[in-house]
Amino acid sequence: MIPHLEGPPPQGTAAPHPWALCRAQASRKALPADGASCYLWGRMNPSAAFFPAGLLALLACAEAAAAQVDTLRVKELAWENKDCAATASCDLKGATFRAYDYRVAIGGDYSYGTGFSARYRTGSVGELPRYGFVQTVRGCQFDSAVKDGKAVLTAAYAREFFGDTAPFHHPRWAFDSVDHDPFYNSDAGRPRHYLYQWNRVPGSIDKRTREFYGVRKPPTPELYVLDYPGTAFVGGAAAKNISLEFETCLYRTSAVPEKAAPEPVGLAGALVCFRWSSSFVYDHARGSYETWDRVHPFCLDENAPAASAAAFKTTVSVQEDLDEAAERVERTVGPPAW
């Protein structure tokens, strides 16, 4: 997730804030003439409390500065519902999960992120609403810097969580939901599958050819969901870190309560689950990012130092910008093979 993108102009200049221009131009899908300077200014000015250059920066600069995108690792699962009689779910044919880490290089700097997609298929279009995903999350996003020879870590990011804005810091497993419905990608006030997607191009997740189930029903019985947890990068002396693990499970819709507490207790009957992670932890001594096989201890500390509420790098008001940028990065990487 990315934070608010407006910030103070660089000191000593009266020129229009390049990041504001970057965002405005990007929102119109036009190329900002100073897209690279926008990106570089943001990385050099981490003191702007609400500015790390997230996916929207990558969006503008990938177009303006010929970014290179590399896939680092891929984890996949293709599941067929072969034992359907045991779970009385023979209308569900299968599901596919894919998580991949990518690196974007712009002007010698790197940003890192993870993309995730999951889809399922049934015997007929009318059977699609019978199933859906639930995702749980553990871990956090945090800033790190070296001060007086010591590493200083801060929980500086926020997210929409169960109807409120909360720190993006989950020491314990929790439903990954913006509202009280743990059903993944549901939207309060709409049918639970309304924002599930299908694509006019079979196998693609390209936004240009996507459709929402709540707007138009697909010709074939498949739906998918996407997730982009955020990006990690270095800005000046500080680094943004991501250390998150997820479990995405497919359930019968009827088995998932429409209202729940954040703690994932009492939910049983998952038909298939997929564990994946997004881990980019900066080693200040080596000057490089590392991928951990576990959640960083800072993210498991329930008393971890956090930024003030006013300084939280909240993402709520620009979620649509995130979706736009993430999907355009996805197109640069290339659609996953299903």
Image (cartoon, rainbow, N blue to C red):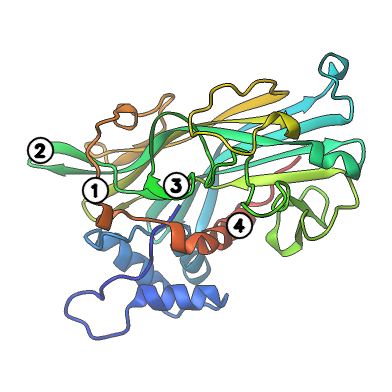
Instruction: Give amino acid for label 4.
Output: Glu
Instruction: Say which element carries label 3.
Output: strand
Q: Nearer the viewer, mark 1 or mark 2?
A: 1
The disc labelled 3 sits on which kind of residue? Tyr
Question: Residue 297 location, x and y as percent?
Answer: 31, 26
Of the image marks 4 and 3, the number of the one nearer the N terminus: 3
Task: Specify few, some or many for label 3: CA neighbours under 10 Å numbering under 14, 14-19, or 20 or more.
Answer: many
Q: Residue furthest left?
A: 148
How far is disc 3 from disc 1 in space, using C-alphas?
23 Å
Closer to the chain start, of discs 2 and 4, is 2
Q: Which residue is mark 4?
A: 327
Residue at image mark 1: 307
Circle nearer the N terminus (4, 1): 1
Which residue corresponds to the image point at 54% horizontal and 63% vertical from the top-left? 320
Q: Nearer the viewer, mark 3 or mark 1?
A: 1
Position of 220 compared to 58: left or right?
A: right
Q: Nearer the viewer, mark 4 or mark 1?
A: 1
- Secondary-structure class at tag 4: helix
Which residue is depicted at the point 23% across and 51% down? 308
Looking at the image, which is closer to me, 51 or 258? 258
Measured from the top left, where is residue 255 in percent x and y?
Answer: 71, 28
Residue projecting furthest to the top: 86
Q: Is residue 144 left or right of residue 209?
A: left
Q: Is residue 9 above or below residue 249?
A: below
Residue highlighted by disc 3: 112
Mark drawn on residue 149: 2
